[in-house]
Amino acid sequence: MKLGERSYSPDYLGKLVETAARVKSFAQAADLIEVWSGQTVSSRNLGRIAEEAGGELVAWRDAEADDFTHHRRQAEGPDPSHDLAAVFVDGGRVQTRATPSGPGVHGEGWKEDKIARIQTMTSPTHTGDPCPEPPACFLHPVLENGAKSPENPASTTPDDEAAVARKWQPEPLVRTCVATMRPLEDFRWLVQAEAKRRHFFTAKKRAFVADGSHGNWTLRDRHFPDFTPILDFVHAAEYLHAAAKVLASPTLGQTWARDLWQGRAASVIAELRDTLDAKGHGLETLDEKHADFNLQRAWTYLGNHADKLDYPRYRQEGLPTTSSLMESQVKEFNARVKGSEKFWHLDHAEAMLQLVVQTLRDDGPTLTDALNSLPTSPFRRNHPALAA
């Protein structure tokens, strides 16, 4: 019957693990399991089961990454010749506690979980810029009362905007992802191994999309140097609107966002620098509480990434210009691991992240398939011993 030490069948055990990975907490998962199975499983026992399964998946993932990294393993199967292979990178926040520790929470603190989205996409190309005017949502700064600025009424309805966007934006196809609590030095090899496994380095077009975090671009420069670097437009526009707010201008942020969208990043950076000079600010870093901090931050942010701002060319070549897919994925991870009431041991957080990774993949083995293939898993098949 292939029963493990808990006398659970492999199929039932797989359902327990997947339920624990897909809902907000072990307590909630235990309630849901009682609903669909009629069986009672304590939240504490469910946590132990998920930790064991996730820990084995982490070991399996690390072994695969080591194969690709140090043993130069090649991607298996025929090369699918992806039209567009895109790597998106970002991070979330997980609350951790000291290990080991006694009952209660000790040494608590927030740590970053590093997440990558390994995404294939359609890639329509165009003879010119398919969307020369930025969507209205990027031109509406939010005022103090939460209302949108009346200086820039929307020229199209949301439905019209969505129809136009579908004509030029690359559409997502197949996603897998990588997530870890480990340092960037470990994370970057995991991302490279997953991209290599999926034949990303032989795709017709390759893009790397992220916000301005230094670690993101270190990863790109070291492991994806021939992927087109693209700074997320949403973050850049947000910084420009914040800078315009410093100058008390309801329209300047719209002008800067439009200029950036239409490929005039150099003029925007120069104007920000001229404004700082006029205010008497040199190259010294302003304190976060300084009235002109957001103005300097926008200049620094765009200036540091001036080589990643050619948005008209990206749209013409069918490349993504925002990391919205990545932002949505971070929320999917946060829904399971982030919360003011959750304090994870690092190993437990790593195990749960890997379970969530497995539930979000569109390619490769399912969660149950993966656990069945692990030699030390309680899900393993019991093969009879060979006769001497």
Image: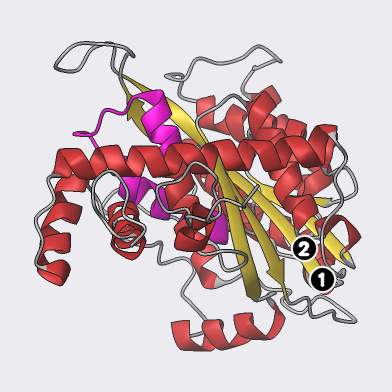
Colour logic: secondary structure
Number of marks in the rendered image: 2
**Above or below, comparing residue 284 to residue 185 in the picture:** above
Q: Secondary structure at mark 1?
A: loop
User: Within the image, what quadrant is residue 215 found in?
Assistant: top right
Crowd around label 2: few <14 · some 14–19 · many ≥20 (10 Å) = many
Residue 324 seen by the camera = no
Foreground of the two, 213 or 98: 98
Labelled pair 2, 1 in contact (Cβ < 8 Å): yes
Residue annotated with mark 2 = 85
**Above or below, comparing residue 189 to residue 283 in the picture:** below
Q: Residue at x 22, y 47 (%)?
A: 25
Foreground of the two, 242 or 164: 164
Residue type pointed to by label 2: Ala
Residue 43 belongs to magenta span? no
Give the percent coordinates (x, y) of residue 344.
Answer: 31, 28
Query: What is the magenta segment's predominant secondary structure?
Result: helix
Q: Residue at x 45, y 34 (%)?
A: 350
Give the percent coordinates (x, y) of residue 59.
Answer: 56, 36
Classify residue 168 as left or right of residue 201: left
Residue annotated with mark 1 = 82
User: Within the image, what quadrant is residue 54 found in?
Assistant: top left
Q: Residue at x 74, y 45 (%)?
A: 193
Residue 338 belongs to magenta span? yes
Q: Which residues are magenta?
A: 325-351
Foreground of the two, 6 or 386: 386
Residue type pointed to by label 1: His
C-alpha distance separating marks 2 and 1 = 6 Å
Give the percent coordinates (x, y) of residue 7.
Answer: 23, 51
Q: Residue at x 62, y 80 (%)?
A: 165
